[in-house]
Image (cartoon, rainbow, N blue to C red):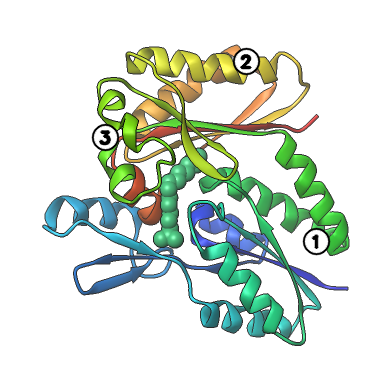
Amino acid sequence: MKTAVLTDSTAYIPDHLIEEKNIYVAPLSVTFGQDTYREFYDITTEEFYEKVKAEKDLPKTSQPSVSEFTTKYEEIAKEHDAVISVHLSSGISGTYQAAVSAGSMIEGVDVYPFDSEISALAQGFYVLRAADLAAEGKTPEEILQELRTMKENMNAYFMVDDLSHLARGGRLTGAQAMIGSLLQVKPLLYFKDKQIVPFEKIRTSKKAFKRMENLLKETADDAEEVKAAIIHAQREDTAKRWRDELSEKYPNVEFEISYFGPVIGTHLGEGAIGITWYKVR
Ligand code: MYR
């Protein structure tokens, strides 16, 4: 059985790994006024953040349509029997549901949708693992089982510079009433039951970094090997400094630096930064 792996563009997997591991990508889009750009194909992350500054219209995002998924699955069907389709949380986007609908209609390839219940490189970690397992010849059921185990060990916390982006896009669940009070602090955010919710209110960004480190430490102290990524929206210098500091303190944690691309950047705004990790063993 030959199994492919497809994800959506919000996994923000580096291009060289997409090529090396033969990962298929279904793009989400950002629209400024009348102009729509598919991330990964039509607009780079740099171009996007420049455009946000230059344009008067704030961008909107959209998921791939069912027919876009169908086209991708048809392409995959030419050379594969099955596809693991890994997507951003169904609690913040209809992407996963579109993949499920397309998968139920397509013939010639068995589609196994997987709701990552998260996004960005945390989602990417599932994709990369699935691609490695598929290359080893594991069955789709074996791959899904491994992804479910990973999910039990996946963590992600992040903060934004300006909560209004999340509030405007309606992606900050249960917090509308708290927005006023949250604006005074740096809330640490995380995913709970597939949705973004405030984890803790923290007074300063210094304390928020420390809190995220302490949460990572709880895993690192108890593990032999941890994979992590610092993910940022145009804060590469801060991300690198933090990575260097953490790498020295936690030698059993392997760090990547990743980014919030156009679609996720629309909802978090420039300046957002977070960390994701999971215990490998
Ligand atoms: C759509 O239009 O369907 C896309 C909606 C994307 C919402 C994104 C909300 C922010 C996600 C933050 C992810 C942080 C992961 C560490």
Q: Mark 2 is on which residue type?
A: Lys
**Residue at point 36%, 26% (across, down):** 238
- Judge left or right: residue 66 versus residue 236: right
Per the image, label 1 sits on a secondary structure element best described as helix
Q: Position of residue 72 (x, y in %)?
A: 59, 79
Residue at 70% from the left image edge and 21% from the top image edge = 252
> Which residue in the structure is indicated by mark 2?
217
Q: Is residue 52 left or right of residue 75?
A: left
Circle 3 residue: 162
Q: Report if the CB atoms under discs 1 and 2 are less than 8 Å apart.
A: no
Local SS, label 3: loop
Up-down: is 124 above or below 43?
A: above
- Which quarter of the figure has residue 81? bottom right
Mark 1 sits on what residue?
135
- Up/down of 148 relative to 39, above or below: above
Q: Residue 122's quadrant in the figure?
A: top right
- Residue occupying the point 16% across, 60% down: 57
Between label 2 and label 3, give the one nearer the viewer. 3
